[in-house]
Image (cartoon, rainbow, N blue to C red):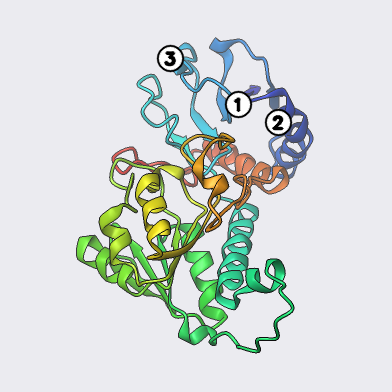
Amino acid sequence: MTTNVLFHSTPKRWAEYQAPLTRAFAAAGLDDIHLAEDIPAAEVDYMIYAPGGATDHDFSQHPRLKAVLSLWAGIETIIDNPTLTVPLARMVDHGLTQGMTEWVTGHVLRHHLGMDAHILGQTGTWDPVAPPLAQERRVTILGLGTLGTAAGLALAALGFPVTGWSRSQKSVAGLSCLSGDAGLLQALTVADILVLLLPDTAATRDILNADTLAALPEGAVVLNPGRGALIDDAALLAALDSGHIRHATLDAFRIEPLPPEDPYWANPKVTVTPHIASETRAITASEVIAENIRRGEAGEPLLHLVDRSLGY
């Protein structure tokens, strides 16, 4: 029997993913797959999900639907949809993880080495002041999922003392792992550079606010390649203006694209990157999608299932 896989996304993504998905299905031994961007609702078995616009899809119109497979790591726009009752898998793939690790490592090193002063601030003044070694610059990562753990281990391998914080206690060799409210405060107080890699949930929104910013060391740097809703924007701008926070490099925002009038653009202590820290790559993501459909058809547990009680 043919397994119908609906690609529910934009025409641009369909053009990007059609060939890699077809190859991945063949490599996974899925020979009887019908992949299309237009399949009658009643005949859809699996949905690959990455809409470019409206996110209020009515999943109840698909009586045969077995699972929804997101191309995104973040699933905050779909998880509360009351019509979604089948398993939901978020995207975790090695291409996405590698991209995030490279962005985090690159910007931590940029701020650690003070590269902006040399790249952007050429004044003709010879000032041979060397930066401290990595062992003297403390990094805290909020969020010890796949992305946070990978980034933390990469930084630890370079010699940075890395503290990781998560809602529930975790243990990662090479990292100092904390959890809970008391652990959050402790993790912030040792963050010369703070990296936000938490999901967007009710428990994490505005986790970086006036109180938690005040717990950071004077002159700390904030990196946010996670979710825009993690930051109270007004509080961060105030902390930058006061000098308590030295710089913020931000890749995710509450409104995207970031509007031209947003104060982040004009603030000299803010670097904006256009949500490029970790993009889903078609080749590697297609392999994950194919493996999950293979598992679903074989009656095996799906990878990266979302726990709706936790929000990720």
Query: Which residue: 70% across, 82% down?
Result: 125
Secondary structure state at the residue bearing disc 3:
helix
Residue 285 in picture, x, y percent from top left: 64, 44
Residue 69 versus residue 249 in the image, above or below: above
Residue where numbered disc 2 is placed: 13
Secondary structure state at the residue bearing disc 2:
helix
Between the residue at mark 2 and the residue at mark 1, the CA separation in whole angstroms equals: 9 Å
Query: Which residue: 61% across, 40% down?
Result: 289
Q: Quadrant of residue 165?
A: bottom left
Between the residue at mark 3 and the residue at mark 1, the CA separation in whole angstroms equals: 20 Å
Other residues around mark 1 within 10 Å, as few (<14) / some (14–19) / many (≥20)? few
Residue where numbered disc 1 is placed: 52
Asked if the residue at tag 1 contacts the one at tag 2, i.e. Cβ–Cβ closer than 8 Å, the answer is: yes
Give the mark, 2 or 3, whose residue is nearer the N terminus. 2
Q: Amino acid at mark 3?
A: Ser
Q: Is residue 74 rendered to the left or right of residue 23? A: left
Q: Is residue 310 rendered to the left or right of residue 139? A: left
Residue where numbered disc 3 is placed: 60
Query: Which residue: 74% across, 28% down?
Result: 12
Secondary structure state at the residue bearing disc 1:
loop
Residue 292 or residue 32, whichever sits in front: 292
Residue 158 in picture, x, y percent from top left: 57, 81
Residue 75 in picture, x, y percent from top left: 46, 37
Quadrant containing the N terminus in the rendered view: top right
* Tag in front: 3 or 1: 1
Residue 186 in picture, x, y percent from top left: 27, 71
